[in-house]
Amino acid sequence: MSYKFFPYNPAIDSIAKKALENPAFQIFGNRFFSGQTHNELLVEFLLISFSPKKIGSTPEFNSCLPNFSDLNVWLDEKLEYSPKARLNLKLFSMLGASKLDSRHKTHRDHHQDLIKALKERIDMDDSGDKDAAVRTLENLFLGFQGTGSGRTWCAQNFMPISNSFLAGETIWNESQAKKHDPQNWEDITSSLTTFLTMNKHRFLARGGEVLYLQICNALRQPKDQVEKWATSSELGFNKVELNPKSLHENLEKELNRMRGHCPSALTEIAEFIDEQLDSDTSEKTDGPKHDRRFVNAGWCRIESWKEGYIFAVEIYRLLKAALDIVDRIHLLEIACAMQVIRSLISQSFRILISESDENKPGYRLAVSSPVDDRPAIRRLSQLSVKKIEKLIYQTLRSEHVDLPQDDEERIKLLNQADKSYGGKLFISLSKRIGFMIPKLGAGARFVMNEQILRYLVITTIPLGGRLTFDTFKQILEHRHGLVFDADGMDRASEWLTGKGLYLPADTDNWLQDMLEAAGFLIQLSDSCALVSNPAEAIEEEV
């Protein structure tokens, strides 16, 4: 029996079946949400990668990815993972950055208890200033704040600098606190589900889970099928990347390397604050090993394996590149956001129009210069945006979606899907990363910025290698549907309007200028240029 969902069919699960009523969850998986930032996409992806996991009733495992042998026999079993809450570390670091009216007395008191316990553990001579040392640590960890500024401290996230900074979502139930009036921190931790909610997925909204499942789904595909597809699609993969088993092995190694990349001193201090200043909180929120809190990782569409495989290669290349850790995190955030965008478009195109014979994206995104003053290109890029938005809109209303018969309920579900999980998600996420401008107002169009350009170069060109400018553009078109030059714009126009568009040969000069300004372009002659990837591979430890 074949399933259209991976890793299990949510229609047979009572809880998941309710979520499946949303047409966007049927089409794209559970779930891509407009309220989740690109930082939170990466945080959630790494959270599930680095947390203990289990498939069905099998023993839990601590590797970043399931064993390759398990991937190949995985059928109709849920993936669950056990994220840590890290309440002590969040409280210590982020109480001062939270809303004043959200700082409950029990939070402030426990914050002072943590500071007192930390001072008692600091060993300094008589001239040392323990208060200054504590303030330095508070400022240090607050400096790694990722998203959620202005939220309650427990709903905020750290940048995923270290495995010890990754934490599941926790929401403070203010209404319950007013109703039950807890007097101390122990009252809260003794009744966690009353005062704290860890299963709402409001900010860590499952998008990172879907990205992780897409990779797992991709790596379990037969080698000959992957090779045939990737070769005919001219995706520019090397020998290792064409073999799912080799890619799995190398991606696992690089994810593990990232898990241990952070300076050990910073990781040890974070773990000390969270687990040893007050061990009772971590024991109650995370549970002992035999009684861990596990979260169902949801599902993705099984046919999304192609975009999932491209994403796996991109993540592998970013992790293998010798980049500054903060720089790598920013590029991984871009990769996650671009994967969500690619998933929305690819699945909509696949369902509504069907894939082209060559297995290359049939859609085209006409990318214009950020300062483009050519009306024809601007209009074509704007038309690309409108076409994709309409494509997603129509897919949610297609015959492939099961909708309730009741008109009022159907309209409600479709409006919700449009607003939070469909076209508006595509627009808002594209604007967040600078892939689309303007941020406000009409006339949205696709553009390029330096961060996205760096992501494209590092994930497209072999580390330390070079490609001709034309080959570079060709691979971007095959992987992302991006077009820049006169020929590409002509293909985009054919798809968008049914008519060709004849433009001058210098249409893509702006892209060459951006590549040259960023140090990626080697101009051999007026008619020949090479795009180089200056990033080298991380040196293997001896």
Image (spheres, rainbow, N blue to C red):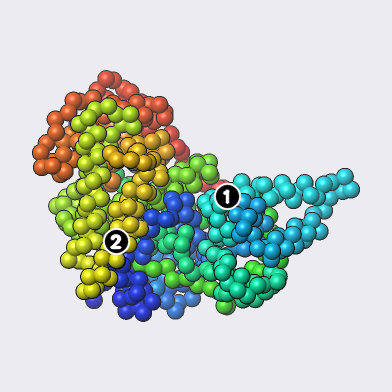
For disc 1, the neighbor class at 10 Å (few under 14, some 14 to 19, many from 20) is: some
Q: Residue at x 64, y 68 (%)?
A: 282
Nearer to us in this view, 132 or 62: 132
Q: Residue at x 24, y 38 (%)?
A: 381
For disc 2, the neighbor class at 10 Å (few under 14, some 14 to 19, many from 20) is: few
Upstream in the sequence, badge 2 or badge 1?
1
The CA span between labels 2 and 1 is 34 Å
* Residue 87 point in image, percent of width and height: 62, 63
Q: Residue furthest left?
A: 499
Q: Label 1: which residue?
A: 145
Q: Residue furthest right?
A: 126
Give the amino acid at mark 2. Asn
Residue 82 versus residue 536 in the image, above or below: below
- The answer to whether residue 454 is left or right of residue 257 is left
Q: Residue at x 23, y 25 (%)?
A: 506
User: Where the N terminus falls, by quadrant?
Assistant: bottom left
Q: Label 2: which residue?
A: 415
* Residue 221 point in image, percent of width and height: 29, 62
Residue 400 versus residue 122 in the image, above or below: below
Q: Can residue 87 be seen in the rendering of this structure?
A: yes
Among the 4 quarters of the image, the one containing residue 495: top left
Foreground tag (2 vs 1): 2
